[in-house]
Structures are given as structure tokens and as C-alpha cells.
Image (cartoon, coloured by chain):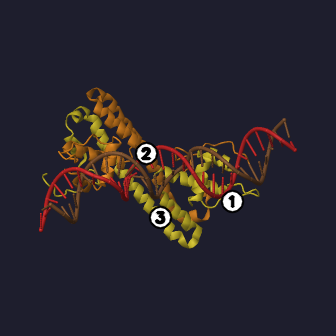
Chain colours: A yellow, B orange, C brown, D red
Amino acid sequence: MTIDEVSKKFNLTKDTLRYWERIGLLPDIPRNDSGYRDYDQHAVNWVYYIMVLRKAGMAIESLTEFVKLLREGDQTADARKALFIKQRDDLVEQRANIDKTIRYLNFKIDHFEDHMLSYENEKLAYEGEFDDSPAQTTQKSK
Amino acid sequence: MTIDEVSKKFNLTKDTLRYWERIGLLPDIPRNDSGYRDYDQHAVNWVYYIMVLRKAGMAIESLTEFVKLLREGDQTADARKALFIKQRDDLVEQRANIDKTIRYLNFKIDHFEDHMLSYENEKLAYEGEFDDSPAQTTQKSK
DNA sequence: GCTTGCGTTGGAGTGCAGACCAAGGTTTAT
DNA sequence: ATAAACCTTGGTCTGCACTCCAACGCAAGC
């Protein structure tokens, strides 16, 4: 497939495809006699694969790391699997954060009238619910 | 509280706090006689609030919009509530995407050996599972 | 009262993730 | 065989979200 076909298939710009390839997010794409990119099935799958993971918020860094390992061959299989597991775990954590925020927003939507009156509720509404709740620093009175 | 205290409390840089204020992510922070920022409870809650929503992936645009509406007063209450609802719905959608990716990663982790052998499985593993699956474009054979 | 270390603003710089452009080669259609 | 529509690379530009100065004011400790 040409770059144009791939870009249309996945609704990505050609620039994005070239960019991804340049920074190592994709393996080297095969070229035809004129030096034009000619995506084979392997390459097309990679594009889709990257697209999905990017869309799910996976860090580009992890993806390049993964592609790098893949290039290094079979002996990196364990490292790659570990990377997947880490990514999965990260996403699970991310989902938990989103869950908390959804609950918080639901609370605010339900109590919208109250909310208008007291900002102090902001914090109370999710304190103890959100992982990154600010450390209870010794709080100078002034 | 001083900017330093707030930045330590929330683990944000002072620059970030000033930046957020500058672009309208935070309401105007009260100043003391020397022009120093002196965060009151209201302001501190806002910082926390923005921090949480940002961390949950909420678009900055929506947050500035919200602060803008809040400045305009009580008559914008409906618009603000609508914004919350939209944000909640966005997050629900985002969570669904993450769920799909988690399932996909779990599949890949479970079938890691297979995966090493056939890239074609990439696509099969989640086609029909991911919303943005590529349109089945009429695919020129070459 | 002077140094040290805070704070202020305005402006410039950084890194990411592309988007855009120019100069040139290739393919297709007439 | 010439135009139109592709492709290539290399480079520059943009917008976001900070991040880091520079130049100055204020405040606390000695």
C-alpha cells in the first residue's frame, strides 16, 4: 500500500506517518524501486497498533522502546512482554483515576446548587478519594 | 498561603501556578500589600480542583471556559453544569477506550508466544473491539 | 544597613507532536 | 512530451504547556 492509502485507511495524515517512522515509532517501511514507501501487511498492522495504543494514552517513549526491542530480535521477548504488562498496569491505574474523577463530577452534578455556595466542598468532595491528594503538610497558619 | 507553600503542598512548580493563573485556569489570586500572591482557601481549592481535572485528562480549554463562566456570575450556572456533564461523558468515553486497550493488552500478554510468530494477529486481536477500527476501504490490490 | 533569599513581571526558550513548505524525482493521463 | 498529481527528503513553523531567565522589589537575619 502507498502512504496515501494507509493514511486514508487509518485517517492519519501522511505527515504523521512519516513522523512516526522518523522517530522510530514504526519499523522501517519498505520502499519500492523509486524510493516510495510501500507498506506491507506487517507495516500496516504496526500503524494500526501504534494508533490504538496512542489513542489509549500510552506514552510514545514506551512505544519507541518497544519498537527498539523488537528490532533487536527474539532475545528481547521477555523485556517486551514486561513492557506490555507495565503498560497494562499503567492503564489500569489511569482508569482508576478516571473513575474517581467521574464519581467526583457526578457528585458535583448532583449537588450543583450547593456547589455554587461553598467552594470548601470542592476538596471535601474527593479528599481521600484521589490518589494524589496533597500531602498533609504541616500548614503554617499564615 | 504563599506561592511557595501552595507549590509545595500540591507538588507543582511556582511557574506552573503563575502560568495557570495567567491563562485563566485559575481565578485572580489575591495579593498582599507588596503584590505577592496570597492564596486564600478559595484559591487553594481551585488549584487542587484544576490539578485533579487536568490529571484526569480534562482539556484545558474546557477548564478555562469554566473559569470564564464562573467569573461571569450566577446566570451562567446552567452552562457550567452542562460543561460538567459533558466532561463526565467525555471521561466515560475515554474510560471505555482504555478498557478496550486493557483487554487487548491482556490478550497479547496471554498469547505472547503466538504473537511473536504472526503479526497478522495484531489486527485480529481487536478488530471489532475498538471504536475507531479503520474503515473497510475498498482496498486496491496494489 | 547590607546580604541573602524570597517575590514580581515580561519575555524568551524548550520539547513534544505534528503541520507545512520547498526543491526535486516519478507516475499517469492526455 | 508536458502537465498534473503523486512521492521523496530536509527544513522550518506552530501551539501547547510549561520552564527558565533577567531585572527589579521586598523581607528577614545578622
> D18 and B59: which one is in front?
D18
User: Label 3 amino acid?
Assistant: Leu
Using the image, name the chain to which the residue with label 1 belongs: A
Q: Which callout, 1 or 3, points to the residue nearer the camera? A: 1
Using the image, name the chain to which the residue with label 2 belongs: B
User: Do marks 1 and 2 both belong to one polypeptide chain?
Assistant: no
C-alpha gap between disc 3 and disc 2: 22 Å
Query: Residue C6 location in percent, x, y?
Result: 23, 57
For marks 1 and 3 on the same chain, the one whose residue lies earlier in the sequence: 1
**Callouts 3 and 2 close, C-beta under 8 Å:** no
Left or right, A67 with respect to D18, comes to right
Residue found 53% across the figure and 71% down from its top: A76
**Callouts 1 and 3 close, C-beta under 8 Å:** no
Left or right, B46 with respect to C11, comes to left
C-alpha gap between disc 1 and disc 2: 34 Å
Which type of secondary structure does the marked residue at label 1 adopt? loop
Picture quadrant where residue B76 is located? top left
> B99 and B30: which one is in front?
B30
Picture quadrant where residue C14 is located? bottom left
Which type of secondary structure does the marked residue at label 3 adopt? helix
Mark 2: give few (<14), some (14-19) or many (20+) Cα within 10 Å.
some
Residue found 48% across the figure and 52% down from its top: B101
Residue found 26% across the figure and 33% down from its top: A112
User: Label 1 amino acid?
Assistant: Pro
The residue singled out by tag 1 in the image is A30
The residue singled out by tag 3 in the image is A83
Q: Which callout, 1 or 2, points to the residue nearer the camera? A: 1
Mark 3: give few (<14), some (14-19) or many (20+) Cα within 10 Å.
some
The residue singled out by tag 2 in the image is B94
